[in-house]
Amino acid sequence: MSLSDQVALVTGAARGIGRAIAETLAADGVEVVVADIDADEAELTAKAITAGGGRAFAAAHDVRDEQSSADVVARILERRGRLDILVNNAGVGPRPGPFHTLTADEYDRVMSINARGLFLTTKAATPPMIEQRSGRIIHISSVVAKRASPNILPYAASKWAVIGMTQTMARELAQYDVTVNAVCPGVIRTQLHEGVVEKMSTLYDKTEDDTWQMFYDRIALGRLQEPADIADMVAFLASAKARNITGSAFNVNGGMEFN
Ligand SMILES: NC(=O)c1ccc[n+]([C@@H]2O[C@H](COP(=O)([O-])OP(=O)(O)OC[C@H]3O[C@@H](n4cnc5c(N)ncnc54)[C@H](O)[C@@H]3O)[C@@H](O)[C@H]2O)c1
């Protein structure tokens, strides 16, 4: 099926990496549903995509809420009759600190969006893909899901969980020709990462510039990634060229050692 007949749901697509994913898929001809908890910003992003010649519409969506995911998928099916691509991108960063100083609420806040929210959205989006006997599910995990990541335990746990769900979902859905893969970004200068660096600077008693430098020093290529780098990998995994790839997690991190 050509990309111009396909419909994609991208979560957390109002800004940052999710916005770049929505723009890239739309540039490839896919109709994109720009879903986000920030409904106003999602509307602006969808309008910008449409103004640029792409096809997009916005949807208010809180990944923590099971009914919200069911409603978004129902709206897509009502409007377009199909759902071909799901990109689970919505996520939040942690309050950095040694794990024994974190509260249960701090752990739950991150897990409820990054892990539980991804499960709930995928649960809602899977039945139409099973019915179609086709579909592409792409999760945004992180470099922190492949190594020990001191001082960000809830975030690391949530992103390791994403890889576990990628492998498990891939095995369960293979019989329907639905593929499930993950992309593991390194460091991208978005609101999420700006917030983490600000808090880490306080924790490590460093300037924000020195904290950013700490990340640069760990990247073999010596530069951060751009949202478009992640979007290009997502677009590849959504394309026909990736038809025989499932259950995998791909680094897009410039050769980053996290520890
Ligand atoms: N920026 C990085 O360096 C980096 C690195 C690795 C992985 N990631 C992952 O990439 C993804 C996107 O992050 P980003 O850096 O673009 O962050 P961002 O903060 O710029 O964007 C996150 C988006 O998710 C939305 N969102 C937050 N809570 C939501 C909810 N409950 N329901 C629906 N939408 C919600 C926000 O409104 C926002 O539009 C996240 O999963 C993040 O963990 C980011």
Image: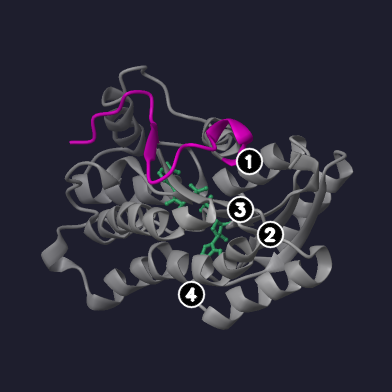
Disc 2 marks which residue?
83
Mark 2: which secondary structure? loop
Q: CA distance from mark 4 to mark 1?
A: 22 Å
Q: Nearer the viewer, mark 1 or mark 2?
A: 2
Under circle 4, the secondary element is loop
Quadrant of residue 152 in the image?
bottom left
Residue under the image location 64 percent in, 46 percent down: 19
Residue 71 position (above or below residue 46)? below
- Mark 4 near ligand 1 (CB under 8 Å)? yes
Which labelled disc corresponds to residue 20? Answer: 1
- Which quadrant of the structure image shows residue 28? top right
Q: Find disc 3 in the rendering and name its residue.
A: 134
Residue type at numbered disc 3:
Ser
Secondary structure that dominates the magenta span: loop
Dot 1 or dot 3, earlier in sequence: 1
Horizontal side of 36 relative to 137 (left or right) equals: right
Q: Is residue 226 visible?
A: yes
Mark yes or no: residue 186 visible.
no
Amino acid type of the residue that numbered disc 4 sits on in the rendered structure: Arg
The image quarter containing residue 106 is: bottom left
Which of discs 4 and 2 lies nearer the camera? The answer is 2
Region in magenta: 238-259
Nearer the observer: mark 4 or 3; the answer is 3
Q: Is residue 124 magenta?
A: no
Q: Which residue is mark 4?
A: 64
Q: Is residue 19 left or right of residue 217?
A: right
Q: Residues within 10 Å of mark 3 (few under 14, many from 20)?
A: many
Tell me the distance, in whole angstroms, between the alpha carbons under discs 4 and 3.
26 Å
Work out which residue is located at the far top of the displayed protein and give it. 221
Q: Earlier in the sequence, mark 4 or mark 2?
A: 4
Q: Residue at x 37, y 55 (%)?
A: 171
- Is residue 241 in the magenta section? yes
